[in-house]
Image: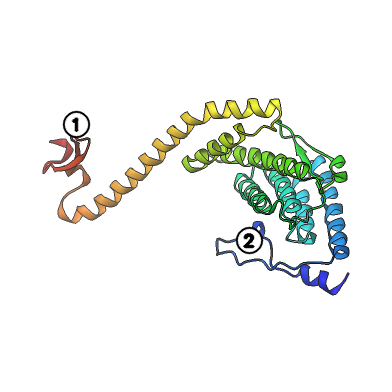
Amino acid sequence: MSTRTERFQRQPRRPQEKKDDSPEEPEEVIRFSPEEEAALLNDSNARKATANELFAKSSYKDAIETYDEALSTCPNYLDYEIAVLKSNIAACHLKLEDWKEAIKAATAALDGLDRLQGRTGDGKDKGKDGASVEEEADEEIISAGAAKAEDTSDPGKREADIERIRAKALLRRARARSEQGGWASLQGAEEDYKALSQMQNLSPADKKLVQRQLALLPPRIKAAQEKEMGEMMGKLKQLGNGILKPFGLSTDNFQMVKDEKTGGYSMSFNQGGSSS
């Protein structure tokens, strides 16, 4: 392997591999000659094919490790190829019911596609391979080797491929957000499903799934909101009681009174508390 290739492999780890919440440092972009790029991409695709086989055998953790190896080999300016790999990693995490990591990987895939579409048509998109792991509505994943023969000189086909991977990443993130639960995650799932409902490339099964989730999510979101608001108010009350206790008071001594005319609230003081 050439010196330039070795230099590429010593670049900082990709964002999805970070283990903390520290700010991301911009990743250095190293451009390769066409020959070097092709060699790296072939290596990455070979590792991806192995990961696909591992997924088919339900070896999801091994598949994730192998997809990561494919990512470490793929030039970091090939956003389409990287998005495919990260979307596949999200699918693995779904199988493992690791919702947080599935959301993280799917979001990374979608961010890459956004960057790619921002460059479409300006001659900077250098992606070459469209091979990916396909996911059906029942989460079964199979290999799509026929996509390897795609002609990336066709802008229309490239755009269709981007939208295909976008739909898959959105479906995976939406499901992970829905399964993770919580007010914010459920709202995010609803946003993803709304975006999917506007896409024209979904299968009939995926369309039914999206519509079903859009019907089921609103009451779940409302219940989660009420639960979290109740928990928050409980914690605030506990905090308030701790502050008021030295004065012989508690939050029961204060009541919020709604003005029916204005819809505003005012606070009233009750010396005897709620028991009087």
Q: Which mark is residue 18?
A: 2
- For numbered disc 1, what is the local secondary structure? loop
Total labels: the figure holds 2
Q: Quadrant of residue 134?
A: top right
First in sequence: mark 2 vs mark 1: 2
- For numbered disc 2, what is the local secondary structure? loop
Q: Is residue 88 above or below residue 19?
A: above
Residue 73 x %, y %: 80, 61
Q: Image quadrant for the C terminus?
A: top left
For the point 15% across and 54% down, which residue is it? Answer: 247
As drawn, is 38 to the left or to the right of 100? right
As drawn, is 238 to the left or to the right of 90? left
Label 1 CA crowd tier, 10 Å (few <14, some 14–19, many 20+): few
Q: Nearer the viewer, residue 273 or 78?
A: 78
Q: Is residue 171 above or below residue 7?
A: above
Front: mark 2 or 1: 1
Q: Is residue 223 above or below residue 152?
A: above
Q: Is residue 182 above or below residue 202?
A: below
For the point 20% across and 53% down, which residue is it? Answer: 244
Residue 39 seen by the camera: yes
Q: Quadrant of residue 196?
A: top right
For the point 26% across and 53% down, which residue is it? Answer: 242
Residue 221 x %, y %: 47, 34
